[in-house]
Amino acid sequence: MLLTKPHLSNSVLSSAPRLIPAPSPSHVKPLPVSAAPCRRLRVSATAAEAPAVPALAALSRVDVLSEALPFIQRFKGKTVVVKYGGAAMKSPELQSSVIRDLVLLSCVGLRPVLVHGGGPEINSWLLRVGVEPQFRNGLRVTDALTMEVVEMVLVGKVNKHLVSLINLAGGTAVGLCGKDARLITARPSPNAAALGFVGEVARVDATVLHPIIASGHIPVIATVAADETGQAYNINADTAAGEIAAAVGAEKLLLLTDVSGILADRDDPGSLVKEIDIAGVRQMVADGKVAGGMIPKVECCVRALAQGVHTASIIDGRVPHSLLLEILTDEGTGTMITG
């Protein structure tokens, strides 16, 4: 089809804008700035542009979370009993690390139970009342005055302080001692003549613990208990933790200590035994390679394993986040004893 140019009338031509020659650059005036906001096109990075490199710290955190996933899945819903004491209680930084670890474990689905000592705090208060702390084979010699101080410090001070710290960190803690709901019934030590009111665990009734654990709360247990007559006894926290772990059917028992674990050579810090079975650790005790305060720790681990706890670990509480290293990594941070 043939197209013709439209004919423009004079009226149209007269209304058309006049063409004005472009001024020379020296006569150009800047345009006035409009009061209306100017919308600008945001251009995203193209494939040719290198994206910003994430911070190494952020990448490290993501890697840690990714690597921890299989362990979280494995231990989700499982009960883990932690005995807390030693240097980890004396250092505010380490104390914060332990508390945060416990709350994190609870948040990802594990069921932690905290059993605590309070040796440094007890020693401090004994000295205040003029009593020199005494120990025999790693156990505190406990006369009537010492027992009174032990109960006041462990139950009234240390326990409630730990409960408060856990709550502040975002967990929900419930403070208990062995006397509550007959959780622990004590009996005198066979060496009572030398040790005084140092007791052994006669039995554990975990009835009070089950609903607390099932509700996602963290039991915090001070190891002061009474015998059938109501007499108070100081129970070694390691021993109590082992018996409680057995009573609640724990997957793991972890003892925080001031050493790296069990050493093949006590004079060689580099001789850490990473994993050993019951027969092997008993042989080490018989050979004198395990002695002093390590003996009750090993004995409580062996007894807990014999009663159904899957693994027991003696770990270095001086290492920040030692709980997470032991539970959520392959390397661990101490000695694991297996059945």
Image (cartoon, helix red, strand yellow):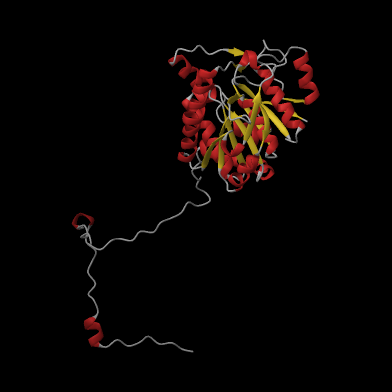
Determine whether 241 is above or below 4 in the image.
above
Quadrant position of residue 257: top right
Residue 176 relative to residue 309: left or right: left
Q: 153 or 15, which lies in front?
A: 153
Q: Residue at x 68, y 28 (%)?
A: 313
Query: Where residue 7 sits in the image (x, y, percent)?
Result: 32, 88
Identify the residue at horizontal 61%, vertical 30% (top origin).
229
Q: Is residue 243 visible?
A: yes
Q: Nearer the viewer, residue 34 or 290?
A: 290
Q: Where is residue 201 shown, x and y percent of the image?
A: 66, 28
> Looking at the picture, how far across and down is residue 192, in whole percent?
64, 17
Q: Is residue 214 left or right of residue 37?
A: right
Q: Is residue 329 visible?
A: no
Q: How many marks?
A: 0
**Residue located farthest toward the right when viewing the structure as drawn:** 279
Q: Residue at x 63, y 13 (%)?
A: 194
Q: Quadrant of residue 272?
A: top right
Image quadrant where residue 35 sits: bottom left
- Quarter in which the C terminus is drawn: top right
Residue at horizontal 61 percent and vertical 43 percent from the top = 208
Residue 168 higher or lower than 187, as above or below: below
Residue 31 in picture, x, y percent from top left:
22, 60
Horizontal side of 241 relative to 132 (left or right) equals right
Give 321 or 10, whichever is nearer the viewer.
321
